[in-house]
DNA sequence: CTCGTACTACGAGATTCAACGTACCATTGC
DNA sequence: GCAATGGTACGTTGAATCTCGTAGTACGAG
């Protein structure tokens, strides 16, 4: 394709579920995993799209991909590709509309009260 | 024991976790199972202790016991024995204190938006 | 004491989940 | 073109989860 853009780096979108069709149990399962909940916490704090590799997860690359996929398919995050990287961001506005107060309540809870 | 009560039927308590030591991910996992979420919904609607067999679950008794155990061990419900029955009730007040707004948000969400 | 009810504990099977390594693809930069 | 970077897809392995049947316990009624 000779007409491809050189300076606007594509921002290819990935398939995401319609939140109206996502049952709450799916979201709860997705967030019930400590590693995934940690990812969501990071995203909520940054409030900006984050590169997948900038989370500093202590798991392998393929495991990381797996968890991001679970989060995306449960409607919690959205991802888009830009250049060689894939960025993730929280679908917080949509989630708030579909499940009012849910994400706020989860993020407000301290994960491990004993550990801090 | 000749001094045992005849009219007050015992109400034996079962071991329950201290909610301060329960991580939010454990609660989310417990509620991420449709059958268990259904149990919690029933309990929230009745607002009174419910006999385990009055839920009309379409699984075997042992499966039922298993799910009630998961809910109890994650701090979502409390159970006590009375006579030959075991009653369950939501620990809603404690949950609200430990995870403000969480249970409310989850119960407010329609489980399957497509189905109803 | 015997029977029925209500429920549990244990063990087993099937399914799902989490983690990984390897191979692979797309983009960037030389 | 070639190598490096960032990430995916596939297959696998071990652990956890869900389901059940069976056996058993505790209580109440007769």
Image (tube, coloured by chain):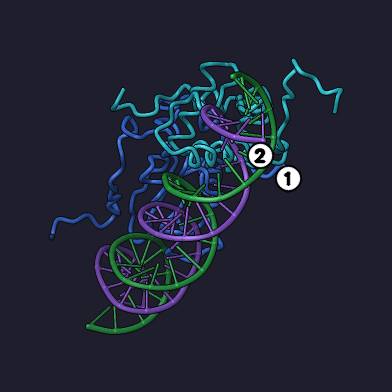
Chain colours: A blue, B cyan, C purple, D green
Do marks 1 and 2 share a chain?
yes
Q: Residue at 28% of width from left, 46% of height from top?
A: A15
Q: Secondary structure at mark 1?
A: loop
Q: Position of residue A100 (x, y in %)?
A: 47, 24
Q: Position of residue A36 (x, y in %)?
A: 51, 49
Q: Is residue A51 visible?
A: no
* Real-space CA distance between mark 1 and mark 2, rounded to the nearest whole angstrom: 8 Å
Tell me the subunit letter for badge 2.
Answer: A
Relative vertical location of residue A53 with respect to residue D26 in this rendering, above or below:
below
Q: Quadrant of residue B18?
A: top right
Residues at discs 1 and 2 in contact (Cβ within 8 Å): yes
**Front residue (pair B93, A31):** B93
Relative vertical location of residue B57 with respect to residue A82 in this rendering, above or below:
above
Residue beneath disc 2: A110
Q: Position of residue D23 (x, y in %)?
A: 56, 50
Q: Residue at 46% of width from left, 59% of height from top?
A: A64
**Front residue (pair B24, A38):** B24
Q: Residue at 58% of width from left, 25% of height from top?
A: B101
Quadrant (top left/top right/bottom left/bottom right) for the N terminus of chain A: bottom left
Q: Quadrant of residue B14?
A: top right
Residue beneath disc 1: A116
Q: Secondary structure at mark 2?
A: loop
């Amino acid at each position: 394709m000779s007409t491809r853009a050189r300076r606007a780096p594509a921002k290819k979108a990935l398939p995401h579920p319609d939140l109206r069709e996502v049952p709450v149990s799916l979201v709860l399962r997705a967030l019930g995993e400590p590693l995934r909940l940690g990812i969501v916490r990071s995203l909520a704090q940054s409030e900006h799209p984050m590169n997948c590799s900038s989370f500093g997860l202590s798991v392998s690359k393929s495991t990381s991909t797996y968890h991001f996929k679970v989060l995306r398919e449960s409607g919690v995050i959205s991802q888009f590709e830009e250049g060689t990287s894939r960025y993730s961001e929280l679908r917080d506005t949509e989630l708030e509309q579909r499940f009012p107060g849910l994400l706020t309540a989860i993020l407000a809870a301290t994960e491990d009260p004993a550990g801090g």
